[in-house]
Amino acid sequence: MNTPTIDKPAKRQRSGIPVGTLLIFLVIFGIAGLIGMGIWGLSGSGSIQIKTNFPVAGEWQAQGRAWRIDFRPDKTIVSKTAASPTTPADAWVSEAGKYKIDYFGNLWVMLKDGKTYTASLVPIPGAPADLAPVSLNRLDFVDSETSAVVVFERTQPIKEVPAQPNPAQKPAS
């Protein structure tokens, strides 16, 4: 009596890169890339400056409040407050701070007492046009703690000049 024997199927040879090896490779290069990006960012060579043509430097007065902020070109500020807007200038209390403009066009004002205010200098990409800054002579500060808005106006307004055509371009005919 012959008994039939079942042969084992022949093993197929795998082609390509093993999944485990591929995962290890991707993890090693991913971690190395993240470390490299972190070092690049910390070194300052990766910083991107936004090119905004919003002139911040100068003195600004809060509407309805006895509060003035003097923005200086060296990114420092002097905040002056008083009991009322009619108080003589020598009686105002001064406080130092600093400001910066981030990549997204937001003005950040940090006072020495820990208060932080923000103002948008450029419209948010894709946002409605009514979210754009109203004027070069007005800043709407938002208190980071309370979300209260304080409107500042420039003490010596800048004349807003409409965009001039590029003289190098020929007019369309």
Image: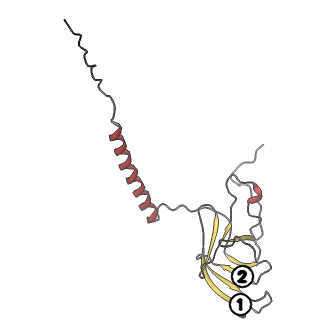
Horizontally, residue 65 falls left or right of residue 124, namely: right
* Amino acid type, label 2: Arg
Q: Quadrant of the rendered structure where residue 119 is? A: bottom right
Q: Does 161 sit above or below residue 79? A: above
**Where does residue 135 sit, x and y in percent of width and height?**
76, 66
Residue visible at 74% across and 59% down in the picture? 131
Residue visible at 48% across and 60% down in the picture? 46
Q: Quadrant of the rendered structure where residue 1 is? A: top left
**Where does residue 104 sit, x and y in percent of width and height?**
62, 60
Give the numbered dot on residue 92: 1
Q: What residue is disc 2 on?
A: 68
**Residue reaching furthest front?**
1
- Give yes or no for contact between labels 1 and 2 (Cβ–Cβ under 8 Å): yes
User: Reading the chain from its start, which is encountered first: label 1 or label 2?
Assistant: 2
Residue visible at 80% across and 79% down in the picture? 64
Q: Does 32 sit above or below residue 152? A: above
